[in-house]
Amino acid sequence: MNSSFELSVEVSERYDFNKESLDRINKNTWVKNQWPLVYFIQNDSKKVAYVGESTNFSSRIKNHLANPEKTNAFNQVSIIGSDKFNKSAALDIESKLIQYISSEGTYELHNGNYGLINHNYYQQDLYSNLFTSIWDKLIEKEIVSKSLQEIENSELFKYSPYKSLNEDQYNSVIEIMEALTNKDSSQIFIKGSAGTGKTILATYLIKLLLSDVSDSNMDDFSETEIIEIELIRAFKKKHPDAKIGFVIAMTSLRKTIQNVFRKTPDLKSSMIISPSETFKQQYDLLIVDEAHRLRQYKNIGWMGVFKKNNEKLGLDNTGTELDWIIANSKNQIFFYDSAQSVKPSDIPKSNFDKLLSKSNAIEIELKSQMRSKGGNDYITFVDTLLNVKRENKSFYSPENYDLVVFDSMKEMYEQLSKKEEKYGLCRLVAGYSWPWLSQKDDNAIDIKIDGLDLQWNKTDKDWINSENSFKEVGCIHTTQGYDLNYTGVIFGEEISFNKETNQIEIDKTKYFDKNGKRGIDDIEDLKAYIINIYKTILYRGIRGAYVYACDENLREYFKDHISSYKSESKLRTLPFQEVKPYVNSVPIYDIYAAAGEFSDLQISTEDFEWVELPMNVTVKRDYFVCQVRGESMNKKIPDGSWCLFKRDPGGSRDGKVVLVEHYDIQDSDFGSGYTIKSYHSKKIRIGDSWRHEAITLKPLSDDSSYEDIILDESELSELKVIGEFITILE
C-alpha cells in the first residue's frame, strides 16, 4: 500500500434505537451512501450489546427494529464507518469487535457465533491497524474500558467461543456438523499438534450447537452464516434439547474453561465435566478436549473410584475413561494429539487407533498453527531438535519468534521479567526434576539454580492466572492446554546430552513424578514421555521461548541450533555531544558486521558508538572495544565478554591473543573473514633475515572440537592482524 492510502475511521454519535430515529440515522454519510459499515447496538443500563455489519444499513436496522427481542433489549446504536471500508474489511472488523467486546466484560453480547471466519483479503494488515484506532475511539467514548492487550491476556478471550475460525477450522466445523446430523451415531477424531486451535474449536462448536436460530431472518446473513444456521437447525431437529457435555480430564484446565462458560451467554459452567461426571446422565454428545490425557487404570492416586466406575459398566481393570465416555453418550468428538501424552496413566494410542478403524469413525486433521508466531516450522523444529533428528545443522532463526538459549538462569529470569512487564502472561516452566518440598512446607525452596531460589506452583487450578505465578515454576500438569506470551523452559537435571553417542539421555533417579515413572522398566519409554513433556511446554509460548538447561552438554547442543543470549554491555555509551575521541572514550566495533571495515581502521566519530573505559584503564588512541562471542577462547575470554583491544603495533606477536582478518577464514564463532585466536608463527631463516613459513591461530578452549587454523606461506599475504587483546572489561 502506498503512502497516499491513509486510513481513518469515524464512530458516530449514539442514536436512539427506535423508529423515530430512522430519519436522523439515514442522514449519516455511510448509511446514506450505502457504504460498507459496522454498527454497535447497546443498552448501558442492561449491559447488553450486539455487533453487526451491513452495506444497506437503512434496510438492516428496520429488520432489527421489527424484532421485539431486540427493541426490548437495546436502546442506542452507533455507526462505525470509513471511506476505505469494503465488504471484506467490514466483515473483518465486525468479527474482531465481536471477539473483543465479548471478552472485555462491559457488555453481554447477544450475537451468535456463526459466520466468524478469518478471510484473507487485499491490504488486510492495514485494516488490522485500523481496528486499533476503532478500539481507541470506543475507549474515548467510554463504550469500553480495557486495552486490547489486557483483553488478549484474559482467559475469556483465549478460550472464547467467539474466536474467528480460519478456513482449516471452519471446514472442520462443517464436516463435524454434517456428521452429527446425517449419521445415527458418530465418533469424530480431531487430530492436531499443539497450537492448532483444538480447544478454541471445541468451545466454538458448543456455542454454535446451542444457538437459538428459530427466528433468524436469512436476509440478514452471509452465505457462510446461512450454511451454519441450516446445520444448527438440522442438529436441533435431530436432537431436541440436546444434552451436550465438554469433558476435560485435567483439573487445572477444567477450572479455567468453567470460568469462561460461566461468563458466556447460552453456556453453563455445569457443562464442563470430568470423565467421572459423565455417569450423571446420558448425553447426546460429549466433546473431549486433550483426549490424549484420558486415563487408564494405571499409576493414578484414586484407583478405588476408578475401579467402581468400571464396575458400573461391567468392565474389569482394563476399562478406561475412554470406555466411560463412549458408554455414556450417543456421539463423541475427541480432540487428540498423541505427541502430548506425558504419563503412563494416559490411554495408549493403540486404543484410539482401534476406534478409528470402525465404520462410524471420522478423522479430521487441523494443520494451521494458531498459537505460536513461529508457525508450523517451529513445531517441527522442536520435535526434530529433542529427538536429535535435525538434518539441517544451521541455526534456526525464526523471523517472528523469539527463541534464545541462556547460559545463566539468572539472566533468563531477568529477561523473562522484562517480557512479563511488557506483555504479561510470561511464566517459568520446568521438567519434574526437583521434589515438591513446598507442598508440605510453604517456606521450603524447591529449586536452586544459579543463585535463584524458586518454588513449584502453589496451586494446581488455573495456576497460569494465579496471583504469584510469575514468581513460581509451573510444570506440565499446570500448563498443558494453556497459552503464554513467553515461556521460560528449564530443562532439569533428569535430562542430559551424551556427546559420544550424540543422544539425549534420561536419569530416572532425578525424575520425581512418581506416577510418571512407576512401572516403566524401559528407559526409552520414560524418555519418550519426558521428551513429550518438554516439547509440549516449549509449544506454550505465543511470542517466544527462553531456554535454560542444567546439563552443560545439553545446553551446548541447543546452542549449536539456537541463538544464545548475548548480554548487553554494562559499559557506559556516551551521547554524541559528550564524545571526545580517545580522550574520554574509545569506539565499539562489531566484529560480526564488520565486512572489511577493519582493513584501514579509519575512524569517523559519527560511525561508531563510543564508550567510557573503567576508571582503572587509561584511554589510549589505539584502543577499541569488541564483544567476543562463542566458546573457542573460553579459557581466556568467556562467551559474551566485552574486551579491550589495541591496534596492531607490529613486532612480535607470538603467543599473543589477536583479532585477525583473512578472507579464507571460516570461524564458526565469528563468521567469515575474522577470528580471535592465540597467534603462533613458524619462521625460516634466510641468511641474516627470516620469513614466515606458516602461522597457526590456536583456540584456547575447553571444547576440543575447536581446531587450529593454519595458514601456509601462500596465504599469509592476505592476513591482517587488526588488534591485540588487552583485557576483559567489566
Image (spheres, rainbow, N blue to C red):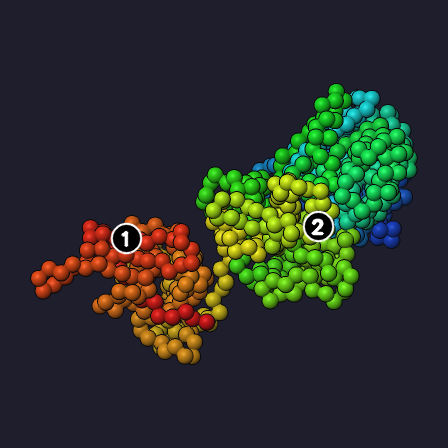
The residue positioned 54% from the left and 57% from the top of the image is 406
Quadrant housing residue 591? bottom left
Mark in front: 1 vs 2: 2
Q: Judge whether residue 676 can be spotted in this image.
A: yes
Which amino acid, mark 2? Asp
Quadrant of the rendered structure where residue 63 is? top right
Instruction: From the top left corner, tell me how far across and down residue 512 is, in percent.
Output: 69, 52
Describe residue 450's horizontal placement relative to residue 682 as left or right: right
| Label 1 packing within 10 angstroms: few (<14), some (14-19), many (20+) | some
Residue tagged 1: 710
Residue 566 percent coordinates (x, y): 49, 60
Q: Where is residue 714 shown, x and y percent of the image?
A: 20, 50
Q: How many marks?
A: 2
Secondary structure, mark 2, is loop
Q: Is residue 523 above or below residue 461?
A: above
Q: Residue 134, relative to residue 644: is it above or below?
A: above
Residue in view at x 77 percent, y 64 percent: 441
Res 632 label: none
The quarter of the picture where residue 209 lies is top right
The residue depicted at 77 percent of the width and 53 percent of the height is 460
Q: Residue at x 28, y 56 (%)?
A: 696
Q: Nearer the viewer, residue 433 or 285?
A: 433
Three-letter amino acid code of the residue under disc 1 = Ile
How far from the left and from the top, in percent, is residue 597?
Answer: 32, 58
Which residue is more in the foreground, 621 or 120?
621
What secondary structure is found at the residue carrying circle 1? strand
- Residue labelled with disc 2: 513
Distance (Cα) linking label 1 and label 2: 52 Å
Q: Residues within 10 Å of mark 2 (few under 14, many from 20)?
A: some
